Amino acid sequence: MTALLLALLGGAAVGLTLGALGAGGSIVAVPALIYLLGFSPVDATTASLLIVVVTSLTALVAHTRAGTVRWREGLLFAGAGVLPAAAAGLLSSRIPGTVLTLAFTVIAAAAGLRMLRPRAPSREGTVSGVRAAGAGAGLGAVTGFLGVGGGFLAVPALVSVLAVPIRAAAGTSLLVVIANAVAALAARAGTGLDLDWSLVLPFTAAAVLGAWDGRRLAAKVRAATLQRLFGALLLAVALVMAVGTAL
């Protein structure tokens, strides 16, 4: 199977995940870039930020049309994470690739278990600005350090901290993903990385097309089912990356 075909398949998976769940793009993109296309961990995390920004913009348009974006909550949450994302993005270039991969694996596994745990339906109420800012800042730091959009953590945080219903959280998380990923990508712009654009561009194009299909899929599947599928995906990715690091 050629590298181009693998890039297209990986991109389609990223787009479907982001479009359906508003999260998980980097969780799929990073291991696909490393294990399918041979990118180094640092190059993979940087390329994933670019891919996730472009794809999330596409998915955000689709969710906005469907009315599943809470702009106030999303901008509040995202704004708190921009500076931590930029600072952590600078730090990540000085961290060994193995450490980045292990940290990514641990966080993916923890998020997967959280998504699989049954949760009582959330009730909307008064949002604590301090709690929202703290959660947003922590999420931004994780985004910058690991080169992830942060949606796989933003969705549960929006539900539990800001009391956003799960379907609205999927759309709203895209604001968080875009803001954090842009900040982290800007911080890495001067690090001298040389990405393989012959693979990054088709990967991104396939992800954009997949995002539209993912949004349509989300409208046909129960929210609880989507959440369980996403949790299982996170655990599977964590397992694959843990085995790959050990070998």
Image: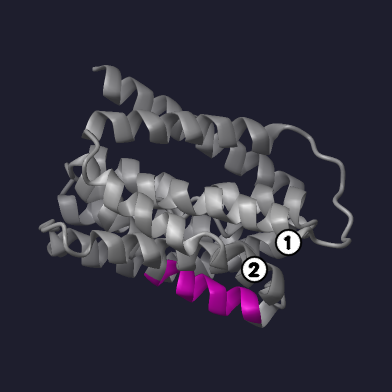
Report the side of 167 relative to 60 (left or right): right
Query: Residue furthest toward the front?
Result: 130
Along the polypeptide, which appears first: circle 2 or circle 1?
2
Q: Residue 220: tell me if it is visible.
A: no
Q: Which residue was labeled with disc 2?
A: 76
Q: Which mark is residue 129?
A: 1
Label 1, secondary structure: give it: helix
Residue at (81, 39) in percent of width and height: 119
- Label 2 and label 1: CA atoms lie apart by 8 Å
Per the picture, the main secondary structure of the magenta-coloured stretch is helix
Q: Is residue 224 above or below residue 165?
A: above
Binning the other alpha carbons within 10 Å of mark 1 as few (below 14), some (14 to 19) or many (20 upward) gives some
| Residue type at tag 1 | Gly
| Residue 243 location (% of width, % of height) | 34, 21
| CB-based contact (under 8 Å), mark 2 and mark 1 | yes
Instruction: Indicate the quadrant where residue 230 lies.
Output: top right
Q: Residue 88: tell me if it is visible.
A: yes
Instruction: Pick the quarter of the image with the C terminus.
Output: top left
Label 2, secondary structure: give it: helix
Query: Residue furthest toward the bottom?
Result: 65
Q: Which residues are magenta?
A: 54-64
Residue at (28, 17) in percent of width and height: 246
Query: Residue furthest toward the top?
Result: 246
Q: Is residue 202 above or below residue 29?
A: below
Of the pair 168 and 5, the residue shown nearer to us: 168
Q: Does 236 lie within the magenta span? A: no
In front: mark 2 or mark 1?
1
Residue at (85, 51) in percent of width and height: 122
